[in-house]
Amino acid sequence: MIVITADQQGSRKDADRVDGARELLGPLRWLRSPDRTAGDELQAVTDDAAVAVDAALALLADGHWSVGIGTGPVELPLPDQTRAGRGRAFEAARAAVEAAKGVAVPVQVRGADGAAAGRAEAILSVLGLIVGRRSREGQEVTALLNTGMSITAAAAELGVSRQAASQRAAAAGWSVEPAGRALAVELLGAADVAPAADPGVAR
C-alpha cells in the first residue's frame, strides 16, 4: 500500500487550501480518497504507484504543500476515514512529510525498501523542481499532454497555434517528464515491498 500525507505550508498566514487540494486529487483512483487529517493536512491511500506519483507532482506543482509518501503494510480492512488508518505505510508517510518540511523540494519517500524509496525520492525531487517552476501556461499544456493528447490537439484545446503550444511545452520542461514519471512509478513500486507478512496487514 502507498499512503500520501501532505501538509500545507505556511498555513497560519494563508487561506485553508485543503478542500482545494482534495478536489484537485479527487479524480485519481484511490482506495481511500484524500481526507483532512488535522487542520491543514490531508491523507490518502492507494495501491497504485502511478496514482501516488500523479498526486505528489500535482501537489508540488500547486506549490503550497510538503508531501510525504509512505509504503508498506497497512491494517485491513481499511477504515472508512483515512485518518483512522494504521500500519507501517501510515507511519512512514508521517515520517516522510515531517522530513519534507526541511528540504528544498518538499517531497520525501519512506518505505520498507529504503534504497528504492531513496531513488524514488530523488527522481520525484527532480520532477518536483521542474513542475514547481512552470508558468500557468506551461501547466495548462503539460496537463493536456500528460493525458496522452498530441501537441496539435493540445494547441487546439488551448486555442493557440501548434508552435505556441510547443514553445510552452519546451519552456515547461515537458520532454523529460514522461520518462521521469515512468521511472518514479517503477521505483515507488519497488519501495512498496513489505517485510515478512503480518496477520491482518496488506501491502
Image (cartoon, rainbow, N blue to C red):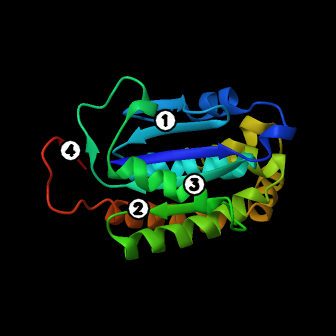
Q: Nearer the viewer, mark 3 or mark 1?
A: 3
Q: Residues within 10 Å of mark 2 (few under 14, many from 20)?
A: many
State the separation of the CA atoms marked 2 and 4.
19 Å
Mark 2 / mark 3, whichever is N-terminal: 3
Determine which quarter of the picture holds residue 7: top right
Q: Are marks 2 and 4 in contact (CB under 8 Å)?
A: no
The residue where tag 1 is placed is 28
- Whether label 3 touches label 1, CB < 8 Å: no
Quarter of the image holding residue 19?
Answer: top right
Q: Residue at x 37, y 23 (%)?
A: 80
If you read the primary sequence from the N terminus, does the residue marked by circle 1 or circle 2 appear first?
Answer: 1
How far is mark 3 from mark 1, CA to CA?
20 Å
The one of 124 and 152 positioned closer to us in this rendering:
124
Residue 13: x and y, percent?
87, 39
Mark positioned earlier in the residue sequence (2 or 4): 2
Circle 1 crowding by C-alpha within 10 Å: few under 14, some 14–19, many from 20: some
- For residue 201, the mark is 4
Residue occupying the point 40% across, 62% down? 188
As measured in the structure, the alpha-carbon distance from the residue carrying label 1 to the one carrying label 2 is 17 Å
Secondary element at image label 3: helix
